[in-house]
Image: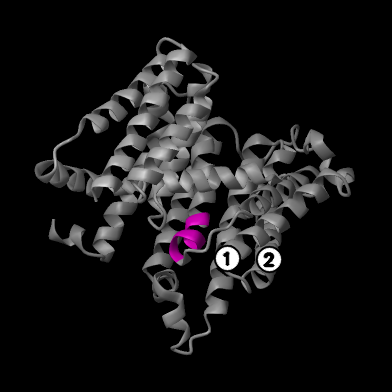
Amino acid sequence: MQFLKRDSDSREFVVMAIIAVVFFALRWILPLIGGYAELANLMLIFGILVLGFDIFVGLTGYLSFGHAAFWGGGAYICAFTLANLTSNAFFAMLIAIVFVTLIAFLMGLITLRRQGIYFAILTLALAEMFYFLAFSPLQRWTNGDNGFTGAETVKVHFFGLPLTDNNLYYFIVVIAVLAVFVARQIKRSPYGLMLRAIKSNETRLTYTGINLYKYKVMAFTISGCFGGLAGSLFAVYERYVPIETLHWPLSGDVVVMSVIGGFGTLIGPIIGAAIVLFLENVLSAITAQWGIILGAIFMTFVIFLRGGIMDIPRGIRQLTERLRTKPLTYFDVAAFIGVWIAILAQLVYKNTVVAFIGVALFLIALIVKLILSRRFN
């Protein structure tokens, strides 16, 4: 089993085989844990979106808030093509991906001349331009705030194979597995190494004389291509494209999914997408305040596990070592109890008042601990 500990073709084959099995079985696993089979389709489609997002953000360290433009653009173009040109999903998706890739390339040329918060705001502004274009000036083709409904009656197929029920799921699984394979090959390649070097120390890399601008533009373009692929696949699955697919909250959801899963890991954001979608579609049926629970989970990862789900093993090791040298304080115990009071009160007893008391206990214990630690240090 030594070959699994180093990056090799044998290890990659085993990893991809496991991923393929999990993706394929997801449709039958979800009903066993309180979900429903159709949710697997959305999880895999959003998984492709956050996978492309992680290729750019996770590897280069540049935060983008404009990926809704790629998702929504791919969905609208694919749905419009299905409704007016061809019912073959392959050609409709291909047209959508080509257009979105071109849009991503042009956006990259414009936005990547800036860094940090300026880059993030530029991507957000450009994405919102597409949203307002679809909302009003182009509503003749997009149907405005009602969303595009022209493809709802189209019998979509893949070279004669009808894409319904299990056939559609297998189609999504194959594309998702191929997307993960391509993304992992990009990360393992010299190009992926260059992107990680940009994230590590862009200033030092600039002094070597390498033209980093073209690497960043290419990464942004590839990321947009993945977003267009996911959006077009969403159109094939839903046959309806809401205007919200282009709005900024979707870009925010992508960031949340990636943070929970773990930036730069490729697989982590896919897991994060599955968790967020599960909470949104399953937990929302139990309580209307499911967003509070998602917010608590997001805050927990930001504060304690910045590497996300994929960082849990390292976090457990660090916690174990810390407990050996420094036992838990009363404030740690109070914060832990407060979190669980809030979760159980909301989920089991649906008592919002008690849940807020639990949140207050957690915050008070955390604040007092921070104040005392600074005073004694």
Per the image, label 1 sits on a secondary structure element best described as helix
- Do callouts 2 and 1 mark residues in contact (Cβ within 8 Å)? yes
Name the residue at 36% across, 68% down.
188
- Looking at the image, which is closer to me, 126 or 73? 126
| Structure colour scheme | one colour
Q: Quadrant of the N terminus?
A: bottom left
Q: What is the x, y in percent for residue 356?
A: 45, 20
Among all residues in the image, which is located at the extreme left? 324
Q: Residues within 10 Å of mark 2 (few under 14, many from 20)?
A: many
- Looking at the image, which is closer to me, 347 or 285? 347
- Looking at the image, which is closer to me, 103 or 23? 103
Q: Reply yes or no: does residue 339 show up in magenta.
A: no
Establish if 128 lies above or below 352: below
Is 363 situated left or right of 156 in this image?
A: left
Q: What is the x, y in percent for residue 371?
A: 33, 41
Task: Specify the segment rendered in magenta.
Answer: 53-59
Name the residue at 28% across, 65% down.
9
Q: Give the number of marks.
A: 2
Q: Which residue is mark 2?
A: 107
Task: Provide the major secondary structure of the magenta segment.
Answer: helix
Q: Is residue 172 visible?
A: no
Which numbered marker is on residue 220? Answer: 1
Residue 187 in which image quadrant: bottom left
